[in-house]
Amino acid sequence: MNQKTSNALDYIALEEKYGAYNYHPMPVVLEKGEGVFVWDVEGKWYYDFLSSYSSVNQWNSHPEIINALKEQAKKITLTSLDFYNHQISVYEKRITEHFGFDKVLPMNTGAEAVEISLKLCRKWGYEKKNICGNQSLIIVCKNNFHGRTSGIISFSSDSQAYAHYGPYMPGFLSIPYDDSRALEEALGRYPNVAGFLLEPIQGEAGVIVPQSGYLKECQRLCKADNVLLIADEVQTGIGHTGKMLACDYEGIQVDVLILGKTLSGGVYPISEALAKVLANDAIMEVIRPGQHGSTFGGNSLACAVALTALNVIEKEQLAENARILDEFFREEMQKFIQEYSIIKSVRGKGLLNALVVNSPEESELAWKICLDLKLKGLLAKPMHSNIIHLAPPLTITKAQLIECAYLFLKAVF
Ligand SMILES: *Cc1c(COP(=O)(O)O)cnc(C)c1O
């Protein structure tokens, strides 16, 4: 065993000894990233097919974004929002105009942005819709993933996320995803609904793409009942599905939009996300000074990084690249699926896809395939025991995707 190999094992041993065991990582220790590639401490490179859950869409350590980070860090990093800072103003104008909203409330992680959306929705329900005190209801979807706070996991249907964290927060009603009839029935039954929260594509559930027309119908139903439609685009937003927002496929504009992950190109904060909540004036105005806040939310460094990250997405036409490669990648994968029964299907939109392995839910097959892919030079992550998440940075080229499809072939068969 050479020096470098023992380093990798040492790092893994240290992490296992001192880190909380809340993830089950692949046995690879990464130390560098560039473009669609990452390198481990032994100098071996891999295609990055996780992109930190679609956070490094602009590519790993994009030079322009890193430069913005460095330049801003030299000047000032954090002012608190008790003072104005010159970065937040420019950034807020840019992001609200870009997505066609009036106001933005900057936070740090995806889960925090979801939390503030729920608070906003409830407060709006009491102050604008006149729902009686503490009676507000928010409809959510089964198999959702919106983050890990105590409030959010209260309406998770994933027993791993939910079990033994009670007592749970009341006020949520869970209905099946991709079922507008269920939404219609719930809205008909409960007059005290303030909002409907959904992912336009359910990412963590295994990249579940709803039928076309579903989002539009949800919008129609919500509008008719004066219920806020809240889209969590933390994973689907900013290009990964081939449009800036997954909601753009149906031409809808939701009442509250939640963004995170790739908003900073995976550069800041270290935990990977900078979250935004965008909402129309009438909604956002229910929040007044002192009623919500965050020490790091909207800090100068975050705003400088996020502004540049958005510019990079536009300048390099990364959403367009995801759209151009949309069908292509699934077609390449489909070639193998037809010939071999080990993979059941491939599904997704743009460059956000998943492979469904033909095995029972509790099997280890997806994990084993990912270990094999790692040996072949591609890092992907099993999401559930039978689903593999495929989300390369949006800078990937057609030729690289062909090579990756070939690596899958070699790994699986
Ligand atoms: C990742 C994710 C979140 C949570 O974001 P964090 O930054 O991990 O808190 C929320 N919603 C969706 C759809 C996500 O994919």
Image (cartoon, grey):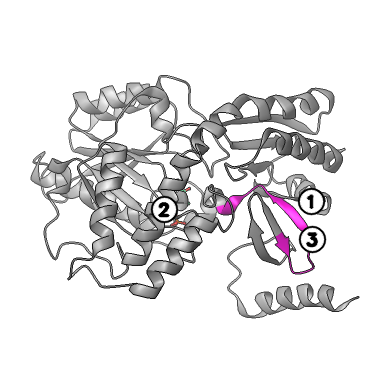
- Residue 158, visible in the rendered structure: yes
Q: Residue 44 shows which numbered tag?
A: 3
Q: Which residue is mark 2?
A: 308
Number of other residues with Cα within 10 Å of mark 3, as a class: few under 14, some 14 to 19, many 20 or more: few
Is residue 150 shown to the viewer in this render? Answer: no
- Identity, as a three-letter code, of the amino acid under mark 2: Thr
Q: Tell me which numbered mark, 3 or 1, is placed earlier along the sequence.
A: 3
**Between disc 3 and disc 2, whose residue precedes?**
3
Residue shown at the point (16%, 51%) measured from the top left: 134
> Looking at the picture, does residue 180 appear above or below residue 383?
above
Which quadrant is the C terminus positioned in? top right
Residue 364 located left or right of residue 187: right
Left or right, 218 with reference to 412: left
Q: On the rendered structure, is 332 left or right of 279?
A: right
Q: Secondary structure at mark 2?
A: helix
Residue placed farthest to the right in the image?
A: 1
Q: Nearer the viewer, mark 1 or mark 2?
A: 2
In the image shown, does 385 or 213 lie closer to the viewer? 213
Q: Position of residue 380 (x, y in %)?
A: 69, 49
Give percent across and percent down for residue 196: 30, 37
- Of 381 and 321, nearer the camera is 321
Q: Confirm whether the magenta stretch covers residue 50.
A: yes
Residue beneath disc 1: 377
Quadrant in the rendering for residue 365: top right
Crowd band around label 2 with a 10 angstrom C-alpha radius: few (<14), some (14–19), many (20+): many
Numbered range of the magenta stretch: 39-52
The percent position of residue 169, horizontal first and vertical second, equals: 31, 56
Looking at the rendered structure, the kind of residue marked 1 is Gly
Indicate the secondary structure of the residue bearing disc 1: loop
Q: Quick check: marks 3 and 1 in contact, CB under 8 Å?
A: yes
